[in-house]
Image: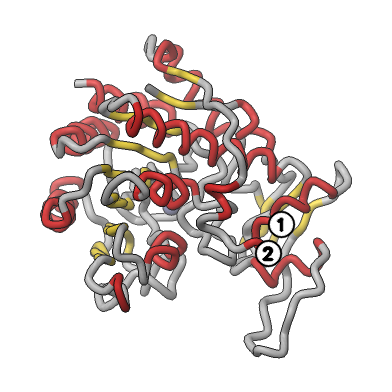
Amino acid sequence: MIIHKSETLMHAPAFGWDHGKGDTYMDRKERIEVILDALQQNDLDELLVPPREFDMQPIRDVHSPDLVNFIRSSEELEPDQAVYPYVFPYRKDICSPRTNLHEAVYYCFDVGTVMHRGTFPAAKAAVDTALEGATRIREEKQGWAFALCRPPGHHSDRDFYGGLCFFNNAAIAARYLSAQGRTAILDLDFHHGNGTQGIFYYDPEVLYVSIHGDTRRHFPFMTGHPDEIGAGPGEGLTYNLPLPADVDFDRYRSYLDRAFKRIHAFSPQYLVVSMGFDAFYTEILGDAVFQTRDYTLLARELRALDYPLLICLEGGYDLDALGTNVVHFVSGVLE
Ligand SMILES: [Zn+2]
């Protein structure tokens, strides 16, 4: 099943901020609209189900109370108001935020992630879609669920947000599932999921495996290296596989095989996939060169792993390609 909640479209900043100039916000609500259109045109919309409303506890199990309160406070913004971070945290113990929305950047790590009045309901709805999927594969032993999460989540850590992300949907779902059994996260967005890695870095119950553009060249730049392997009780449970430039799906397969091997060795009860569509050849935020048909092949391989599978939407910003690529991915899941 595919899980969707219309409130995910409420996050709609008027413009973004890119290298010193105003630009179209990357995570546009049209991303979800083109996916829904494409599903409908291919008679896949019968797979759509709405999530139930979950309480805030699963979010609090992953994120700090300060971050949750801060994101929630965006509801108090005026309709024409938005928060554009422009100051970064002063890294000293003596620094503590006297929180109001204009001091946003204490909790944010970039200038490109914009918060406005619709942000909290959308971020909460994104979490609800992920948790609905987690509940379905847990309680009803469904083989798979695909949560149309928006805004995405994998760049948000326990106590900060950024990279177009607010609440970490996949991490919240994984934490929720891990109460029932060992859970692995496979992050296939083109970018490293620094937030998910950070949340589970010391955690012995959740394995985090990521294949991503080399962060010496790509966002988020400061994490995602092979020598980051987890620490303390989580040592050995973080596995980073950076990609060479211009990788196609044939070459990507060898990275997938290594990721699958690591996941099998962990023998999880559940698998959560952070699924980005930004490795596509037209995507401007990455340099991989996936073709549309590759998403069917990729989905087939994920299903063949034979774990209960929760797929959470992360990136993918080319509105001319995203709907078609998601349809090809779903058709592979259904085979
Ligand atoms: Zn991405």
Q: Residue at x 69, y 35 (%)?
A: 10
Tell me the quadrant of the picture where the N terminus can be found. top left
Q: Quadrant of residue 145?
A: top left
The answer to the question of whether label 2 and label 1 lie on touching residues, with beta carbons closer than 8 A, is yes
Task: Kindly indicate the quadrant of the structure image that contains residue 18.
Answer: bottom right
Image quadrant in which the C terminus is located: top left
Residue at coordinates 59% horizontally, 53% vertically from top-left?
166
Locate residue 259 relative to residue 312 in the image: left or right.
left
Amino acid type of the residue tagged 2 in the rendering? Asp
Q: State left or right for residue 204 relative to residue 221.
A: left
Q: By what rule are the colours in the image chosen?
A: secondary structure
Which of the pair 236/166 is nearer the observer?
Answer: 236
Residue 321 in sight from this viewpoint: no
What SS does tag 1 mark?
helix
Instruction: Give how far across and how far down residue 100 sits, in percent.
Output: 83, 65
Where is mark 1, residue-wise?
69
Q: Is residue 84 above or below residue 229?
A: above
Binning the other alpha carbons within 10 Å of mark 2 as few (below 14), some (14 to 19) or many (20 upward) gives: some
Q: Amino acid at mark 1?
A: Asn
Q: Relative to 62, does residue 108 appear above or below in the rendering? A: below
Task: Find residue 302 and report its horizontal and vertical position in percent.
Answer: 21, 38
257 vs 248, nearest the viewer? 257
Give the total number of marks visible in the rendering: 2
CA gap between label 2 and label 1 equals 5 Å
